[in-house]
Image (tube, rainbow, N blue to C red):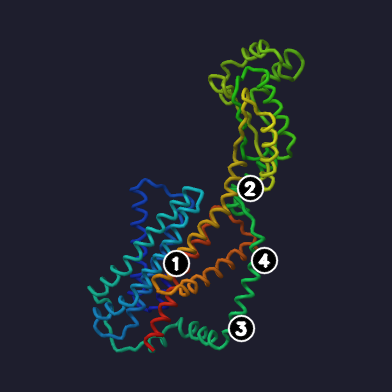
Amino acid sequence: IALILMLSFRSFKGVALPLLTAVIAIVWTLGIMSLAGYKMSMISNNIPIILLAVGSAYAIHVLNRINQVLEKDTRKAVTIALAYVMIPVVLAAVTTVIGFVSFIFGAYLEMIVDFGVFTALGTFFACLLSLFFVPSLITAFAIEKRNEITLENKLRKSVLSENFLGPLKNLLFKHPKYILTSWGLLILISMGGIFLIKRSVDIQEYFKKGNPTRQAEQIMVEKFGGTKPIFVLFKGDMQSPEVLQTMMRTGEYMKKSPDIYTTQSVADLIAEINEVLDGERVIPDERDKIEQIWFFLDGNEVMQRFVSDDLGEGVLMSKFRSPDNKEKKEFAAYMEKFIAENSTPECQIEITGMPFVDITMDRSLVNSQLGSLSIALVFVVIFVGILLRSFSSGIYATLPIFAAIMILFGVMGFAGISLNMATVLVASVALGIGIDYSIHVISHFNHVYKVT
């Protein structure tokens, strides 16, 4: 960022003020997070990076506008520049805040909600600093003496203008139809990639393929039945033959699934002891026999893992092998059918564990993405339309962002990048940040159109 600022402004002011603005906004935001008792997560860790980009952008627009004003007096130049840039910067900040706040309504995880709230707060701070702190510093210290250099001379000396912006402008005005056609084709191709996007909530995919953590996970899956625990809870008398027999049937039914490695429960222990005593690995039909076997188990620490102290609840533990969401869903349907047929008032059966948590999160990924994007798009169109006094301006401002999001998802689909609880943020972040550029282009166009 510092390198690009130096190439663009070619002054200490142009580098220091945008970065200073962003750093102060970051410090304030993280300070409030700490004072409010919030902890950093793998999602909120991204807040400083985003605020560095957003915070410096607002200051860049303010500085650039001040530089464009052809006025020797610094105070007057700042006043003229702020009169023009105030509305676009505020509008850009508000729409960005809307993009982040949309996570509050569409997100399914607390860490994503926290990310949205505090990134929105940091964006608000960055906007205030850009509009008040930066102009105050320039006015108070007159960091750079203004002279009679015209805007054309400034642009001519800019490396970016000479090597990039000038040729780009010529291309845009000479071949608008070809450019629109190219963008249209790119969007159509991207739509095909959208259907290839896969959802994933498997933690191991967050690590690179050569990472020791991911390699260890693969070894656990291949050799030891995986690391995703499954718990089947039985509510009933743990010394009842019927309850224990139901527990045994549940374990045997689960083992028929290729993704179940093994099962463990108090019923297994009782059946094993009964095999030693009577030669059969079964649950006795008489309660007296079960109580006798229970005498051998009573006081054993392992019993605390399988039954409650009052013997009113017991748990069957297992491990799920496959990380594939489709197989998790199939197993969930497989178990739901069994539970519906075997759960009774005397023996209530419930099932949970990481595969079922993953299924819920997987379902929430789409709901979160659609919810946050829809809310953000609607509010951005309405808000931009109201402030620019033109509903069509709200549509125009949103179209490039919509196209960018389509291409973004298309790239994710073709590149095999999964939609997970981290990448689900990207579209709304792109909308919140990207709308700024549309607003500045439209505002500048309207200004130039009125002047000329």
Q: Quadrant of residue 45?
A: bottom left
The three-letter amino acid code for the residue at tag 2 is: Gln
> Which residue occupies 50% across, 52% down?
107
Q: Position of residue 260 (x, y in %)?
A: 70, 37
**Mark 3: few/some/many CA within 10 Å (<14, 14-19, 20+):** few
Residue 372 seen by the camera: yes
Q: Residue 250: which disc?
A: none
Q: Which residue is mark 3?
A: 178
Judge depth for marks 4 and 2 and give the one in front. 4
Nearer to the camera, 135 or 194: 194
Judge depth for marks 1 and 2 and give the one in front. 1
The three-letter amino acid code for the residue at tag 3 is: Tyr
Q: Earlier in the sequence, mark 4 or mark 3?
A: 3
Q: Earlier in the sequence, mark 1 or mark 3?
A: 3
Q: Marks 3/2: CA distance?
A: 48 Å
Q: Which residue is mark 1?
A: 382
In the rendered image of this protein, does residue 48 appear above or below residue 68? above
Q: Residue furthest left?
A: 140
Q: Earlier in the sequence, mark 1 or mark 2?
A: 2
> Which residue occupies 62% across, 22% down?
346
The three-letter amino acid code for the residue at tag 4 is: Gly
Mark 1–mark 3 contact, CB under 8 Å? no
